[in-house]
Image (spheres, rainbow, N blue to C red):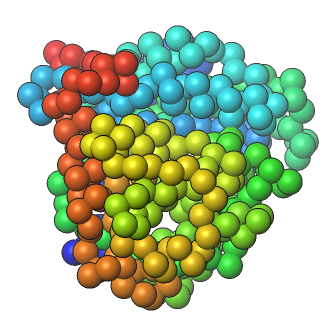
Amino acid sequence: MTTAAALETLASPGTANPEWIWRSGALVPWDEAAVHVNAVGHASVAAVFEGIKAYLAADGQRLLVFRLDDHLRRLTDSARLCRLTLPHTAQELHRAVVELLTANDYRQDAYLRPWAFPGGIIREQMVPADALCEVIVDSWPFRSALDTERGCRAAVSSWLRVGESSMPPRAKAFSNYHNGRLAMMEARENGHDWPVMLNERHKVSEGAGACLALVRDGVVATPSLSSGVLPGITRDTALALLRTQGVPVEEREVDRSELCLADEIFFMGTAWEILPVTTIDGLRVADGTAGAVTRRLSEAYGRLMRGEDDRFPQWITEVPLS
Ligand SMILES: Cc1ncc(COP(=O)(O)O)c(C=O)c1O
């Protein structure tokens, strides 16, 4: 079972830049999408984004953007939580994503990153709330790990997940990622692949870029949305799929010690898809391979992404290939 080296799921090595990027209402050639060095809003503390995947359908005829409107709703929520004003409606951004995928003519899985940030020259650290926002939509091909046998070594981090008393954890804001990055580096320095972060109450929160669930005696438990998690769209999808499989699901507070006693643990996220955890804090999880619940879920998730499960049509935006 592969570990860290195979876990960088967002880009295939050597991926060329796309021809087009969407910026402020129009397609722009990639090389012309520049900003001035003093226009720091695109990388500032006040910027929010989304990570969305478009999968090539099993029939090879269409790209299937997964839960596009739910991602755009979360982008709108993140902007509100961070006091940013989006200059485009969710419908306009929906059309932008479809337009961009068509223009770049992807014939493989693609990753999309809509990104909203204060535009123009910014000299104030505390970007004013009325700063004019710009939105871009970036995209690139990626290699899905859906068909890969894999697992990862996880460890509880000494860094706590940002909480309601510091920064809104429900916002997908770039500034929140400093927190997850430190936890990830700590995990790697200590010989693990990914961190598990506890929240301010020292209960399990999430995995710095993915939500988490465990299985014990056939019951799936995942930290509730009040545990400092980003409201994960993959988490929501996984819970829906598990329920259709008749698996009991609990959304509640999860203790750290439950991780050590679990029969299975898995991460859930757009980038990581369904990723089994094989060791936690150095302890093997069951026999150290993906368990039955995780495998069944992962297979169901793969069928859904490839358009082979028609029970959730509201989650799929089809983009026909020309
Ligand atoms: C901090 C954080 N938590 C959880 C997730 C999982 O969310 P989703 O399943 O919507 O990708 C992500 C990924 O976007 C994330 O960045």
Image coordinates of residue 311 in percent, x first then y, are 26, 24
**Looking at the image, how many numbered discs can be counted on the residues?**
0
Q: Which residue is at 28% across, 58% downward? A: 293
Residue at 45% in and 88% down: 282
* Residue 276, quarter of the rendered image: bottom left
Q: From the image, which quarter does the N terminus lie in? A: bottom left
Give percent across and percent down for residue 285. Answer: 36, 79
Q: Quadrant of residue 300?
A: top left
Residue 276 can be seen in this image = yes
Can I make out residue 108 in this image? Answer: no
Say which quadrant the C terminus sits in.
top left
Along the viewing direction, whichever of 292 and 236 lies nearer the viewer? 292
- In this view, the residue in front, 132 or 315, is 315
Nearer to us in this view, 124 or 292: 292
Q: Relative to 179, is 216 on the left or the right?
A: left
Q: In which quadrant of the rendered view does residue 115 lie? A: top right
Q: Does 143 sit left or right of 314 as displayed?
A: left
Image vertical order of residue 111 relative to residue 83, above or below: below
Q: Nearer the viewer, residue 306 or 61?
A: 306
